[in-house]
Amino acid sequence: VDIPALDATRRWRGWQADKPQIEKIEAEEMRLGLRAKVRQAMTRARLFGGAAIFIGTGERNTATPLRSEVVSSGGIKYLAVMNRRQLSPTEIEQDPQEELFGKPKAYRLAGSQLDIHPSRLVIFSGAEHPDPEVASGNEFGWGDSVLQALFESIKQSDATMANVASMVFEAKVDVIKIPEFMERVQDPEFRAQVLERTQLAATAKGINGTLLLDKEEDYETKSANFSTLPDIIDRFLQAVSGAADIPATRLLGQSPSGLNSTGEADLRNYYDRIQAAQELDMSPALRLLDDCLIRSALGARPAQIHYVWNPLWQPTANERSEINKRTAETIKILAETKLWD
């Protein structure tokens, strides 16, 4: 639940504008705590199936659409993270010519009659419903918890770990064979003598390591074999990792396995997926808020201002040095060949 939300906001984004404008926009983001609240909303959306960030502009009528062009400098007063249990979707928009077609017309705050227009909310959903039309009640307008799809894998892995833990306490079992035990066990007096006998033997063994037995009794120790258990545990954890679509090196914090394996390919694929989520899910959800944010920071909305998501994969010092060297060589070749003025 936490890891993808943290990684999606860890490097955040880089604004493309003049330096004074960037400083004002970043200061406005810091004042509103935007980065932390986006991470919090994404975490709750992944856990509960949905969450939203309310854009507080000080307007009393929240049922009307939010128009970014009316937001002036300092127009965003605050941002508030709300869970799906705090927001109940109202009726669905049935007009295909409307922008909200197939989505709720408004969200009602729990315990009140206050309606909030969707444009005033930055909505994050969890796992998408395969068929939103069959969702009913408070589920409508939201998604599923991401745990829904991998709960079985988590449960199986947890049960395996619990069984392995219980085996540790049964790693060594002492077996004492008593003559005519099954024939005489029905006798209460005999059962009491057996329990007293084994307790005395265990006490003597615990004191001096000597086990006292009758000449006709037999004693042996059985030990459990744990050699294959690590592989079994790893298989179940890999199933959880695959269901969560998070590499084991990131999910479990373990070093890559295999000869000459660095885990770089797995992490790159994972980071590509996070970047796709940033561009396909987060950017559209933040679009109206970003317009309001720029106006709140600068007092206007210059059309050329935009942002790019900072890459999660960071090159090492040696890789940066090699890149800079190749760039310098490329510039030198272009200058010497005079392909351009």
Image (cartoon, rainbow, N blue to C red):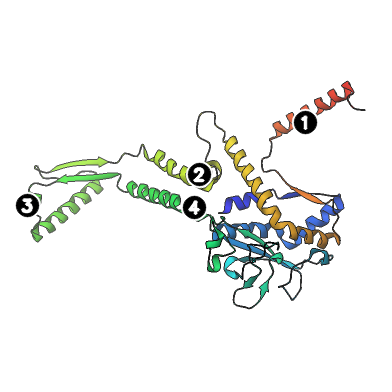
Distance between the Cα atoms at labels 2 and 4? Answer: 11 Å
Q: Earlier in the sequence, mark 4 or mark 1?
A: 4
Q: Earlier in the sequence, mark 3 or mark 2?
A: 3
Q: Earlier in the sequence, mark 3 or mark 4?
A: 4
Residue at image position (17%, 52%) is 198
Locate residue 311, reporting x and y percent: 70, 43
Q: What numbered label is drawn on residue 242? A: 2
Instruction: Describe the element under mark 2 as helix, strand or loop.
Output: helix
Q: Earlier in the sequence, mark 2 or mark 4?
A: 4
Residue at image position (71%, 59%) is 34
Kind of residue at badge 1: Asn
Distance between the Cα atoms at labels 1 and 3? Answer: 87 Å
Distance between the Cα atoms at labels 3 and 2? Answer: 55 Å
Q: Nearer the viewer, mark 1 or mark 3?
A: 1
Q: Which residue is mark 3?
A: 183
Kind of residue at badge 2: Gly
Kind of residue at badge 3: Glu
- Circles 3 and 2, Cβ within 8 Å, touching? The answer is no
Instruction: Describe the element under mark 4 as helix, strand or loop.
Output: helix
Locate residue 336, reporting x and y percent: 88, 21
Kind of residue at badge 4: Ala
Q: Which residue is mark 4?
A: 149
Q: Earlier in the sequence, mark 1 or mark 2?
A: 2
Say above or below: 231 vs 157.
Answer: above
Q: Earlier in the sequence, mark 1 or mark 3?
A: 3
Q: Which residue is mark 1?
A: 324
Q: Residues within 10 Å of mark 4 (few under 14, many from 20)?
A: few
